[in-house]
Image (cartoon, rainbow, N blue to C red):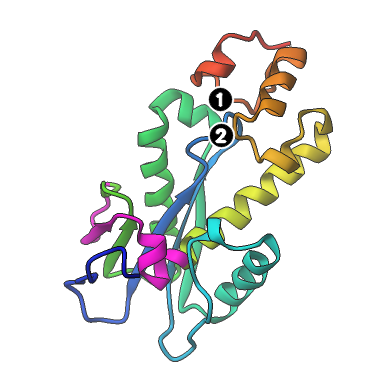
């Protein structure tokens, strides 16, 4: 993209893993991370920041990533782990779990953001990486599709909170439901909008 300087990567092998997460801001559920090693012989058209894609396009691309990538994995850190560790450390835990879950060992990491997750595999951070490198974009898509599905499943159990619509983010609808109904077990107790309400 023209908004960013060219991305210089100090690695030229075939086992580069893009790593990204989804779910730092919501008040409920896990933070989900994904790691993807793309196969250059099976390119996937249209990989991009998951937030810029329609749900239908994300789902189609997620299927393509699972079928055509050299390796991919999704992992998470639970709401309980977020409360125990804080969201920053829990996010990095989810990333490390995704990297370790890859069926092919990564040799180099490209991690979205400005902090490495503390994994032994070398790599580099890429600010706005989901827009700048296809492997990170692929990871963002897998992570978002996975977490959105979790929120839809939670909605089916507790439709009164509206999780299928807001995906757990602190929207007006979600905050009103918290005030009316109180938090669920899945809510993050350490987050300020939840902390004030007692478990029903």
Please state which of residues 154 and 112 is positioned toward the viewer in this rendering: 112
Q: Quadrant of the C terminus?
A: top right
Left or right side of 168 for 78: left
Residue 156, position as x, y percentages in the image = 82, 40
Q: Which residues are magenta?
A: 118-137
User: Magenta segment: does it hold 37?
Assistant: no
Q: CA distance from mark 2 to mark 1?
A: 9 Å
- Which residue lies under the disc numbered 1? 188
- Which residue lies under the disc numbered 2? 26
Quarter holding residue 63: bottom right
Pointers 2 and 1 in contact (C-beta within 8 Å): yes
Which residue lies at the image location 47% right of the left edge and 24% below the top edge? 83
Residue 103, position as x, y percentages in the image = 45, 69
Residue 171, position as x, y percentages in the image = 64, 30
Which residue lies at the image location 73% right of the left edge and 42% below the top edge? 165
Mark 2, Cα crowd under 10 Å, few <14 / some 14-19 / many 20+, is some
Q: Is residue 146 above or below residue 168?
A: below
Q: Is residue 68 above or below residue 36?
A: below
Residue 188, position as x, y percentages in the image = 56, 25
Left or right side of 89 for 55: right
Mark 1, Cα crowd under 10 Å, few <14 / some 14-19 / many 20+, is many
Q: Quadrant of the N terminus?
A: bottom left
Which residue lies at the image location 41% right of the left edge and 72% below the top edge? 134
């Amino acid at each position: 993209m023209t908004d960013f300087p060219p991305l210089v990567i100090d690695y030229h092998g075939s086992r580069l893993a893009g790593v990204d997460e989804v779910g730092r801001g919501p008040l409920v559920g896990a933070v989900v991370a994904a790691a993807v090693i793309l196969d250059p012989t099976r390119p996937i058209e249209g990989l991009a920041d998951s937030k810029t894609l329609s749900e239908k396009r994300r789902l189609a691309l997620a299927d393509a990533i699972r079928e055509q990538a050299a390796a991919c994995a999704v992992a998470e850190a639970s709401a309980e782990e977020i409360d125990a560790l804080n969201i920053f450390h829990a996010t990095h835990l989810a990333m490390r779990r995704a990297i370790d879950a890859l069926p092919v060992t990564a040799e180099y990491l490209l991690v979205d953001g400005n902090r490495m997750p503390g994994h032994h595999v070398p790599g580099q951070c890429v600010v706005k990486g989901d827009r700048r490198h296809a492997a990170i974009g692929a990871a963002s898509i897998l992570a978002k599709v996975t977490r959105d599905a979790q929120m839809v499943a939670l909605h089916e159990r507790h439709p009164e909170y509206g999780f299928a619509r807001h995906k757990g983010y602190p929207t007006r609808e979600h905050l009103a439901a918290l005030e009316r109904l109180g938090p669920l077990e899945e809510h993050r107790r350490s987050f300020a909008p939840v902390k004030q309400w007692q478990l029903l």
